[in-house]
Image (tube, rainbow, N blue to C red):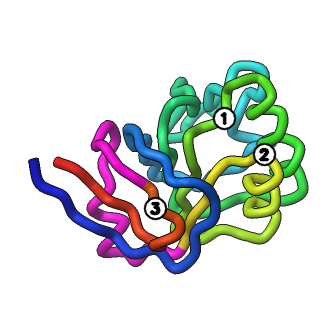
Amino acid sequence: MSEQFVKLARAYGARVEGPLLVSADGFSPRYDLDRATGVVTRVGHSLYGHQLAGSIVAFPTAKGGVAAGWAFLDLHSRGLAPLAFIFGITNSVMVHGAVMAGVPIADGLSVEAWEQLRTARWAELRPAKRDLRLVT
């Protein structure tokens, strides 16, 4: 088993580990997600049909705004929140929503680092160290 470490510009929350679920598309909790099921329901989205719970989900960008706060809290209250969010680039509303819901969040991956992420690869998000440990 080998490991690789990816640096993050910013990270907040508790240390978590689990499988990665990596998207080629940005993410809006209002338009891409069914909050009742935690499944990505926007037709054409690269994660269409996938449930976020139980995974560290990675999106290249955040889309949208004010819906994140209540959407993430709603997901968390239903037990449907992901283990953590990782964004290439995010916005303050997404960060606020994740913090409010108690879901770890990180952003600021370089393009080279993003290319190392693969769905189902085991990862450990370590916000205090601002890194992501990838296990192969």
Neighbour class for label 3 at 10 Å: few (<14), some, many (≥20)? Answer: many
Q: Residue at x 45, y 56 (%)?
A: 125
Report the residue marked by disc 1.
81
Image depth: mark 3 or mark 2 in front:
3
Looking at the picture, does residue 135 appear above or below residue 45? Answer: below
Pick whichever, 27 or 54, lies toward us.
54
Say what amino acid the circle numbered 3 marks: Arg
Camera-near label (1 vs 3) is: 3
Residue assigned mark 3: 126
Q: Is residue 100 left or right of residue 62?
A: right
In the image, the segment drawn in magenta is 108-124
Q: Is residue 34 left or right of residue 56?
A: right
Label located before the other in sequence (1 or 2): 1
Q: Residue at x 71, y 59 (%)?
A: 63
User: In the picture, residue 79 is in which quadrant?
Assistant: top right
Residue 46: percent from left, percent from top: 48, 40
The span from disc 1 to disc 2 (Cα, nearest Å) is 9 Å
Labelled pair 1, 2 in contact (Cβ < 8 Å): yes
Which residue is found at the position 39% from the left and 75% from the top?
7
Q: CA distance from mark 1 to mark 3?
A: 18 Å
- Disc 1 residue type (three-letter): Ala
Q: Residue at x 78, y 21 (%)?
A: 36
- The x and y percentages for residue 98 are 73, 53
Question: What x and y, as percent, mark residue 28?
Answer: 72, 49
Q: How far apart, in angstroms, are the residues tagged by discs 3 and 2?
A: 18 Å
Checking the image for residue 101, the label placed there is: 2
The relative height of residue 96 versus residue 29 in the rendered view (above or below) is below
User: Between 18 and 41, which is closer to the camera in this rendering?
Assistant: 18
